[in-house]
Image: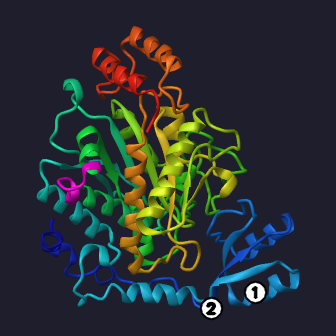
Amino acid sequence: MHRALLIALAAGALALPASAQESHLAAERYDNQKVVRVTPRGIADIQLLERVSGDRWTCGPGGAAGEADYRVREADLRTLDQAGVPYTVIISDVQKLIDEERAGQDPFHDRAFFDAYQNYASVSSYVNTLAATYPSFVTRISLGNSIQNREIFGFRLTSPVPPLGGSPRKPVVFFNSEQHAREWIGVMVDLYIATQFLETYNTNAAVKSLLDTYEFVFVPLSNPDGYNITWTTQRLWRKNARTINGTVRGVDLNRNWGVGWGLDSGSSGSSTSDTYRGSAPFSEPETQILRNYALSVPKLVASIDFHSYSQLVLRPWTYQYTLPPGKAAFDRIGNAMVDAIAAKTGASYEYGGPDILYLASGTAPDWFFGTTGAIGLTIELRDTGLNGFILPTSQIIPSGNDGLAAAIAMVSGLCRADLNRDNFVDDADFVQFASAYDVFLTNSADFSGDGVTDDTDFVYFADGYNQFACP
């Protein structure tokens, strides 16, 4: 379907755009502000930039070139010039981009859902539309409530084809976005992937195979309070809405997960920092809710945490330079995702670890991989700095196609019988499978998704063993 039907069913949410539904009268303005790309020469430059800016867009500095993007006032450029800090202006007028973004939400513009960014109410309505239009494929779920009591909702998406071996549920792939409130494109990409899965199930053999084999769980708004702030008062707000000493300071949700939490090299202990990690791992209801849902799933096999910007596919570990176990499998899948994006849209993405971006401790993908064993990846979506977080609406569908290509490549590339993730299903994997099979009540070699390793899983493993090489 049925683009026209989706437009009609979503008409209630789209009759007025988010900008018309929520007032911007008190919105913070960013006049005379720019974004500069800096290559710090040392710690003194970094300290100066942190003092002058306070808003580090790429959360660096990091990467091979040590580059990082900062939002600064026009008057602060003189300070950088006097200190000899090398920089390039990549966004000359932040407020102009925001004004253009808001103009794109014209209430009288005849548009489809993916022609504009959507607020919380519109996203919720759209999920209801998907569930109503595809009742045998989509089930809305409620995971819990945020600090400000907004529902964190999502939906389960799979085909009516029954799970393998009579399992009550298929293995789960988990897609979430918007841990960082200002990264609006992630919400739209999450929903675009789901919509394309549904619309192409009967015509795309790869999509049909995925939905027949796996269940996909989408959580498009992991940080609804922060998202509301970006729609009402501070477009560039990053964190959640945690109140500290009577003031909304916020916690960076993607520094609040349990694996690698608390390292100053990848987060901050200061509540005034945009990378403030919170008072303890999972101190925030939003991360607790996502964690608890993931742990409730009998068999979680893969996850993507959508962010922007930089056009990257990132593997664990993000909190340290030590390579993860099974790096060979991550490399195979990650590079396949980058290649799939290039073939689909022509966009250039890069795959790697913290060496191509920066250290970040307490992130969701590290927790998903470190705790559940699932393939856990981050995708930093478009662009590479021309617009940063304020990506034009014309880039929504192209970004959605980036995400779609990456998602299909990742899940199609899962080689679940390769238990040691060396890209071959061989005797070493048989030893691991036999150990789990003997214990029985373990899901370490569970292929059916029922939470145990039994005869059904042996049949699946044997098929993979006969194939020998991973796709």
Gap in angstroms between the C-alphas marked 1 and 2: 11 Å
Q: Secondary structure at mark 1?
A: helix
- The quadrant in which residue 210 appears is top left
Q: Residue at x 65, y 69 (%)?
A: 56
Other residues around mark 1 within 10 Å, as few (<14) / some (14–19) / many (≥20): some
* Quarter occupied by the N terminus: bottom left
Q: Is residue 398 magenta?
A: no
> Which mark is on residue 32?
2
Q: Nearer the viewer, residue 452 or 407?
A: 407
Q: Secondary structure at mark 2?
A: loop
Give residue 200's position: percent from left, percent from top. Answer: 22, 58
Q: Is residue 351 above or below residue 425?
A: below
Amino acid type of the residue tagged 2 in the rendering:
Asn
The span picked out in magenta is 198-206
Give residue 143's position: percent from left, percent from top. Answer: 31, 47
Q: Is residue 436 above or below residue 286?
A: above
Q: Which residue is mark 1?
A: 77
Asked whether, in this view, residue 459 is left or right of residue 355, the answer is left
Q: Is residue 203 magenta?
A: yes
Number of numbered callouts drawn: 2
